[in-house]
Structures are given as C-alpha cells and as structure tokens.
Image (spheres, helix red, strand yellow):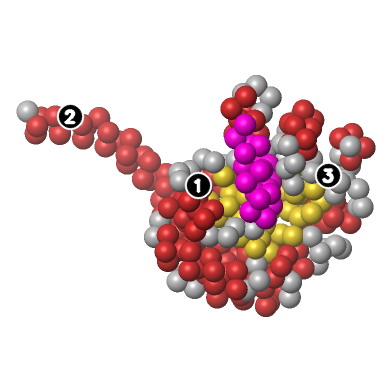
Amino acid sequence: AAKADGRRTRRLFEPAMDAALQGRRSLERDLRAAMAAEALEVHYQPLVDARSLAVTGCEALLRWRHPERGFVSPADFIPVAEETGLIAPLGEWVLARACREAAAWPRPVRIAVNLSPAQFRTPDLVGTVARALAESGLDPVRLELEITEQVMLEESAANIAVLHRLRGLGVRIAIDDFGTGYASLSYLRAFPFDKIKIDRSFTAALGHEAAALAVVQAVIGLGASLGITTVAEGVETEAQLSVLRRSGCDEVQGFLFSRPVPAADLRALVAASAGPWMAAAA
Ligand code: C2E
Ligand code: MG
Ligand code: MG
Ligand code: MG
C-alpha cells in the first residue's frame, strides 16, 4: 500500500515539481545573464522624519527588467539567488552601487541596504562592506544594513559576532519587517540594533485593529527606552501617518510619500529642502 501510495504521489506531484525546478533554473540562468548585461538597477525609496517630514535617508531596492517577463519583483528572485549562491555577487553589486550613488547625493542622508540570510553566511561579508565603503568614500555612519529576524534565528552566536564586526566599521544595523518572525524581544537583548522597522502589515491594520495599534505603540515605547530609532513601513494614508506621529514613531516610509524611484529622481528629492508631500501632509 505504501508503495502504491508513493507511486501515486509521485505521479501527481512530479510534473509540478519539475516545472517549479525548471522555472527556478531558467530564472537563475536569466538572472546570471541580467547581471552580466547590467539589466539590474537599484531604486530608492525615501525614509521620512515623522515630525519634520524631511527626507532622512532612503532604502535601496533591487529592480530587474526582464526582456520577456517584464518587471520581476525581488521577492521572486532573491530566494532563487539565495538558493544558487548568486546572492553573494548580487549583494556585493547592490552594496557597491548604492554606496557609490549615495556618496554623490547633495545632502548626506542615510542609505539602507537589505542583507538576506544567505548573504550573512557568505564568509567575507564584513570585507565586502568595508570595500564598498572604501571604494565609494561613503561615510560609514550613512550606511544602514537591514536584516530580518530570520538572520537572528540561524546560528545566532555566529551572526551576532558578524553584526558586532559590521558595527565596528561604523555602520548602523536595522531589523527589518519587525514583528513577523519569532522571539523578537530576545534579539533586542542579544544585540543592540540601531533601528527597528515595524512591518507594514501592522501599519496596514492600524485603522481597524485595536491590537495592531497596541503592538505598534508598545514597540515605539520599547524603542524609545532602549534608544533605538523606530520606523513604520508601508505608510499609505494620512490617517496612518497621523496615528504614527501621535504615537511618537521616529520615521515613516511608504507610498504616501514616494514609491521606490530611480537614482536621479531620488537625488532630486534629496536636493529639495521640502518633499512634495509636505504641503499636503504637514
Ligand atoms: P523590504 O526590505 O521590507 O522592502 C520594503 C518593500 O515594501 C519594498 O518592496 C517596497 O517597494 C515595498 N513598499 C514600500 N512602501 C510601501 C507601501 O506603502 N505599500 C506597499 N504595499 N508596499 C510598500 P520590494 O522592492 O518589492 O522588495 C521586496 C523585498 O525584497 C524587500 O522587502 C527585501 O526583503 C527584498 N529586497 C529588495 N531589494 C533587495 C536587495 O538588494 N537585497 C536583498 N537581499 N533583498 C532585497
Ligand atoms: Mg528592507
Ligand atoms: Mg522592510
Ligand atoms: Mg517588509
């Protein structure tokens, strides 16, 4: 019976698994080609001071324009890059590009770069970051590295050592998508993060879920007493902004202010003393 079941399972799932595997392989092939052909670019989304609404920095977000598939979301290709080891050269490229572009901006705002869990396991991450800083001439205090709770979940002792070495370079560490992983509070004890980015699912629920507001306010309070900057991700409405401001959130990021934009557009936003959203949202 077990054998028959096994056969049946294989018949049912094999074609689907093959298709998924082939999809991953062709995605990997295309991604390698894209890196070679410079079909990748970095877009930037402003981070805004919740009180003054001035741009305090921006987050680098990878973009891939695929000739047939059109725009491919990083959410789709980062996992493939992680599985195949492509994440190391890809991550290095993003870091170098973001540091170089940020070094030339008209004001010394911060630049945040995402690091995936697999990038954390690459042996020379600290060297890669040091090189990106040296080659761009970017002041290390302007670089912020965003990691997820997932990173802290794996091999936490080794990862905490890497975080300390990164911090030794003078860069800041932010914990991304906060509240979506596990055991978040123990990480705050284990490592002194500079910034907490509250996941956008909490921001989205602010207007209609009392529990979401309670959690957000507790995290903001925790940040304030630990000396950690708090940021709300995914701010899309004036109502969300005003709740976050009243709750004492330090920074906000979201479509209400700007979508991720090409480097030249971000440069203009940084150069302007006031964002186009200020008149509307102040
Ligand atoms: P993330 O680091 O949490 O980045 C924020 C994501 O939320 C971005 O999606 C951004 O476009 C989106 N977002 C920003 N504001 C709003 C809003 O108001 N509403 C909504 N609905 N979405 C908003 P994106 O660019 O598609 O990136 C998805 C994820 O891919 C990122 O999540 C990050 O984990 C990963 N990623 C992006 N670029 C890189 C990279 O260069 N390296 C690594 N390792 N991961 C990256
Ligand atoms: Mg991020
Ligand atoms: Mg995030
Ligand atoms: Mg997120």
Lower position in the chain sequence, tag 3 or tag 2? 2
Disc 2 marks a residue whose amino acid type is Arg
Q: Of helix, strand and loop, which one carries label 1?
A: helix
Q: Name the residue under label 2.
A: 8
Image check: 126 left or right of 155?
A: right
Q: Which of 261 and 115 is in front in this view?
A: 115
The part of the image, by quadrant, that contains residue 146 is: bottom right
The part of the image, by quadrant, that contains residue 95 is: bottom right
Crowd rating for badge 3 (residues with CA inside 10 Å; few <14, some 14–19, many 20+): some
Contact between marks 3 and 2 (CB within 8 A): the answer is: no
Disc 1 marks a residue whose amino acid type is Ser
Residue 184 numbered tag? 1
Q: Where is residue 235 in the image (x, y as percent from the top left)?
A: 71, 36
Q: Is residue 226 visible in the rendered structure shown here? A: yes
- Predominant SS of the magenta segment: helix
Crowd rating for badge 2 (residues with CA inside 10 Å; few <14, some 14–19, many 20+): few
- Residue at 20% from the left image edge and 31% from the top image edge: 9
Q: Give the range drawn in magenta.
A: 214-233
Residue 64 shown in magenta: no
Residue 223 shown in magenta: yes
For the N terminus, give its image quadrant. Answer: top left
Q: Mark 3 points at which residue?
A: 51
For the C terminus, give its image quadrant. Answer: top right
Q: Considering only vertical position in the picture, is 209 above or below 171?
A: above
Extreme residue toward the front, this view? 225
Q: Considering only vertical position in the picture, is 54 above or below 204?
A: below
Q: Of helix, strand and loop, which one carries label 2?
A: helix
Q: Where is residue 7 in the image (x, y as percent from the top left)?
A: 15, 33
Extreme residue toward the left, this view? 1
Contact between marks 2 and 1 (CB within 8 A): the answer is: no
